[in-house]
Amino acid sequence: MTQKQTERLDKILLHPVFGYLIFLLVLALTFFLTFSIGNYPMELMEKGVNYIATLLQETIPQGFFNDLVVQGIVGGVGGVIVFLPNILILFLCISLMEESGYMSRASQLMDKFMHAIGLHGKSFAPLIMGFGCNVPAIMSTRFIEDKRDRLVTMLIIPFMSCSARLPVYIVIAGTFFPKYSTLVMLCLYVLGVILAILFALLFKKTFNKSNHVPYTLNLQEYSIPKVKAVARTIWINCKDYLSKMAGIVLIASVVLWLLMYFPQKDTNNIEESYIAHAGKVIEPVMKPIGFDWKISVSLITGVAAKEIIISTLGVLYSDNPETSSDVLEEKLKSSGVFTPPVALSFLVFTLIYFPCTAVFAAVKKESRLKWAIFVVTYTTLVAWILAFATYHIAGLFF
């Protein structure tokens, strides 16, 4: 676009009123595409995973190895990989905003607001990146010159609901609130943003003040996003996601299944397994927010990666090797533990408690060990308090 066309667009997109409304519409469209349109390719992938599970079930001789492959590996990894389309759509939207030049405008537009909550305009981009993945978002804070602003931004990024939490939202909200699943998920994102704002204000009063420097940036001309650049971004994130499936999620799924299989050497009697004993140890702490030992175990495994939460629930609640979302939904509904109040409490807890070990490592690398420990502690504490409130308030209506 020409300089004149860019200036005309900036008058609209950077308008003190319409600019914010347009920005909210862009975010709403992003969520709609991710959660609603993304369900169609997700269902196709789910059918493919079920076909593979059935084929392996019939091909591999019955016994330990058959159960390990079908239930542990395919059931665990397959239950998570089906959400790849939703995650790629989210990264597609973020990439389009960056390549078109709109993301930098949004950062400048939000500078006054960021300043009001004690942050710099440069903090906006890392926070938006946090919706994709918290780790690169935390690493990108190194471009914020002021140490205080950089630290506060790192401490509140975990409230930005990363793509790894999407599978949990889709399954739980879709199971217990099918008519309002998109609204429930949107509310979770809004809650995360509100918490980030509140704690930014709190940290602003706690830490030493810094001198605010207005966010000035030579904005580039608007341009039509290049297919190659967008495709490269999607491919990189797709590769990272699949690498996680082949690494952390695969290992965690196998370890989880083994802990569930032994010492009784049977997955039909999970109550006597090692994983059950571990879950029952922390159950008293989680009972006030409606969680039993199975839910507690899924949250523990989510420390490695949030995607594992769904595969954990699939392994713990399903005695069927084809752990599709439909099967899992029925198991959760008939569990006698998962109710709408528990589901809401579970969603709130998943949103707030610290994302994963990779985030812990990133905060430690970009700051100090004490701040990484602080992030784990305060987000988990806040998660428990708000989950407690959610569970008991929701119980009045359901």
Image: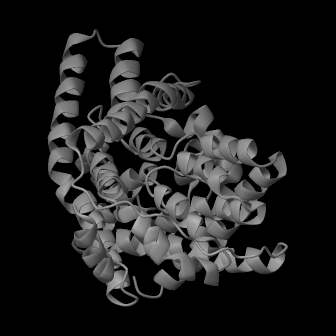
**Where residue 315 appears, x then y in whole percent?**
42, 38
**Where residue 35 appears, x then y in whole percent?**
26, 60
- The structure residue drawn at horizontal position 75% and vertical position 74%, both measured from the top left corner, is 203
- The structure residue drawn at horizontal position 77% and vertical position 65%, both measured from the top left corner, is 148
Q: Which part of the image, by quadrant, shows the C terminus?
A: bottom left
**Where residue 384 appears, x then y in whole percent?**
65, 67
Residue in front for this viewpoint, 61 or 152 = 152
Q: Is residue 281 left or right of residue 179?
A: right
Residue in front for this viewpoint, 258 or 129 = 129
Disc count in the image?
A: 0
Residue 341 seen in the current view: no
Q: Quadrant of residue 50?
A: top left
- The structure residue drawn at horizontal position 18% and vertical position 20%, both measured from the top left corner, is 55
Decide: is 114 above or below 47.
below
Q: Which part of the image, by quadrant, shows the N terminus?
A: bottom left
Q: Quadrant of residue 231?
A: top left
**Where residue 333 appears, x then y in whole percent?**
33, 60
Decide: is 41 above or below 51.
below
Q: Is residue 73 left or right of residue 3?
A: right
Residue in front for this viewpoint, 328 or 153 = 153
- The structure residue drawn at horizontal position 24% and vertical position 18%, both measured from the top left corner, is 56
Q: Is residue 239 left or right of residue 360?
A: left
